[in-house]
Image (cartoon, rainbow, N blue to C red):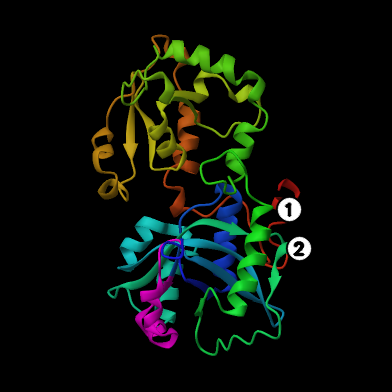
Amino acid sequence: MSEIFPQKIHLFRVSSEWYQVVADNYLVSGSQAINCFFTSKKDQLNNESLASDAEPGSLTLFSVDIDGCEYIVGGAFLLSHRNIMPERCWRNMGVRSGFKTFEDFINAVEKEGGNKDEALSCYILNSTFLFTHANMIKIPDEFSLHYESRTRLSFDINEPFARYIMKITLDRRSTQLKIGNAHQDWSGLYFLTSHSRSATYAATAFAQLLNLYNFRCAITGSEALPVLDVAHIRSLYDDSFNYPQNCIIMRNDMHRLFSAGYITANYKNDDKIVVEISKSKLSVLGDYAKYDGCLLSLPEDKSLWPSKENLEWHHEVRFENWLKQGEFSIADPKKHMHRLSKIC
């Protein structure tokens, strides 16, 4: 096991601004891939050898200065370390890089001594978790971390500080896990509102919709029943949203891409609805790119097709949502996750 489990944990000191943007999107959309980036100038200050310790799966924690004290406010698990040009970084990660707009992002890069023509040192992280205010962890005074001008530190997992902080962090994370979804992460308010009140009607709606769509995925044509889902266009707040004009039968992989904002659908005219794939993601979607522009296979009765209003909502709110700031605003890290504390 020791050969597989990462031997380092990382501590990233993040700005309250970065943290607020990430926290907003975490609250709304749940645990997703995010980006902590450093310019080459910051890399030199931080000690470039840290990149060589960036083992996939390493626990990475975020600390924020609150009233002169350092607090662990959450963390994630390292997917990879990559050098990425700023424009491509924004296309792929958007606000999940911790900034509301591309202009804010580039301004931050320049402030840290970089520029738009120089690759960034990016730490891509997944399975994010952020703590309620009550669960934030004040770094004990006896652990003098000596950040100085650096913004990240690494520790061997056998060091006293690493053992202490790993145990208390993972214990507190466990109180926020949601058993039943893929990685037992926080699912986000969109997911919770889409499922919390619909269980009693879900089976009936699924049967009716499958028949309307002739037991086929509207995009791929797949007839494999075990992989067919009802994809809701708008978030489902109660059973009244479980109606045909707000639902499309999709294969579960297409459903996940639809929910994640990688794909959407639009009326081409009154007789056609076409799939649109994010241009930012075409290069990474492989065979899925062939569905860009394809027609949806829809019920014979046009009155039961997805409504224009609902599809416009999906395009505005969900499509390419990593390029958009979350709907909620968390103004102060000392008060962050107040709503989440009532849900978890």
Label 1 packing within 10 angstroms: few (<14), some (14-19), many (20+): some
Residue 176, image x and y in percent? 66, 51
Query: Which residue does the image show at 27% across and 33% down from the upper left?
Result: 291
Marks 2 and 1 sit apart, C-alpha to C-alpha, by 9 Å
Q: Is residue 246 left or right of residue 216?
A: right
Which x, y percent locates residue 170? 62, 61
Asked if one can make out residue 59 in the rendered structure from this viewpoint, the answer is yes
Q: Which residues are magenta?
A: 37-57
Residue beneath the point at 57% across and 46% down? 184
Is 46 magenta? The answer is yes
Residues under numbered marks 2 and 1 in contact, where contact means CB atoms less than 8 Å apart: yes
Q: Is residue 138 above or below residue 229?
A: below
Q: Nearer the viewer, residue 45 or 105?
A: 45
Q: Main secondary structure of the magenta part?
A: helix
Residue 292: quadrant of the picture? top left
Against 341, is 288 above or below?
A: above
- The circle drawn on residue 135 is none
Q: Which residue is mark 2?
A: 134
The amino acid type found where label 1 is placed reads Ser
Q: Residue at x 29, y 75 (%)?
A: 118
On the image, numbered disc 1 is attached to which residue?
341
Q: Is residue 100 visible?
A: no
Q: Are there few (<14), some (14-19), or many (20+) residues within 10 Å of tag 2? A: few
